[in-house]
Image (tube, grey):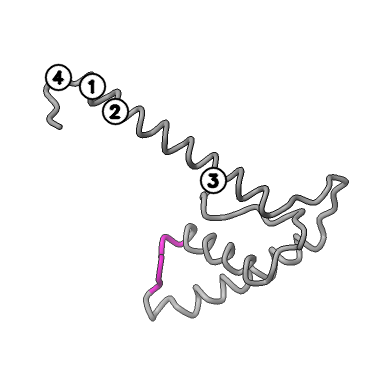
Amino acid sequence: MCRNIKTLHNFKPPATDAEIRASALQFVRKLSGFTRPSKANQLAFECAVDAVARTARELLDALVTAAPSRNREDEAVKARARAAERYRSIANTATATAGNNPGATT
């Protein structure tokens, strides 16, 4: 899954229209392969973003859960910790790889 598309279900306060549209935009960008479509594709791109955002809102409004609502700040802290660990492990792997390559220059 694209890391830029965030889970929006079961948060307190609920997802805003801006958050849903941002996720829809990321989804359409990923699907189309366009970051910014050409003028010829702009209308189709915007229509797709609108349709995905509408459908996402309908989905979020229809979903039910018995789980307690998640706190946005707590989830942001967890996400930052996961990212720090991911980047730390990448840096450690790169350092270890460079250390095992006698022909590498530093």
Q: Would you say residue 39 sits in the magenta stretch?
A: no
Label 3 sits on residue:
80
Relative depth, front residue between 98 and 41:
98
Q: Are marks 4 and 3 in contact (CB under 8 Å)?
A: no
Q: Which residue type does callout 1 highlight?
A: Gly
Q: Residue at x 37, y 76 (%)?
A: 38
Q: Are marks 2 and 1 in contact (CB under 8 Å)?
A: yes
Dominant SS in magenta = loop
Q: Is residue 86 above or below residue 93?
A: below
Marks 2 and 4, the one that precedes in the sequence: 2
Is the residue marked by circle 4 packed among few (<14), some (14-19), or many (20+) residues within 10 Å?
A: few
Relative depth, front residue between 102 and 38:
102
Segment colored magenta: 32-37
Q: Which residue type does callout 4 highlight?
A: Pro
Is the residue marked by circle 3 packed among few (<14), some (14-19), or many (20+) residues within 10 Å?
A: few
Q: Which mark is residue 51?
A: none
Q: Secondary structure at mark 2?
A: helix
- Quadrant hosting residue 15: bottom right
Q: Which mark is residue 102?
A: 4
* Residue 30 seen from this side: yes
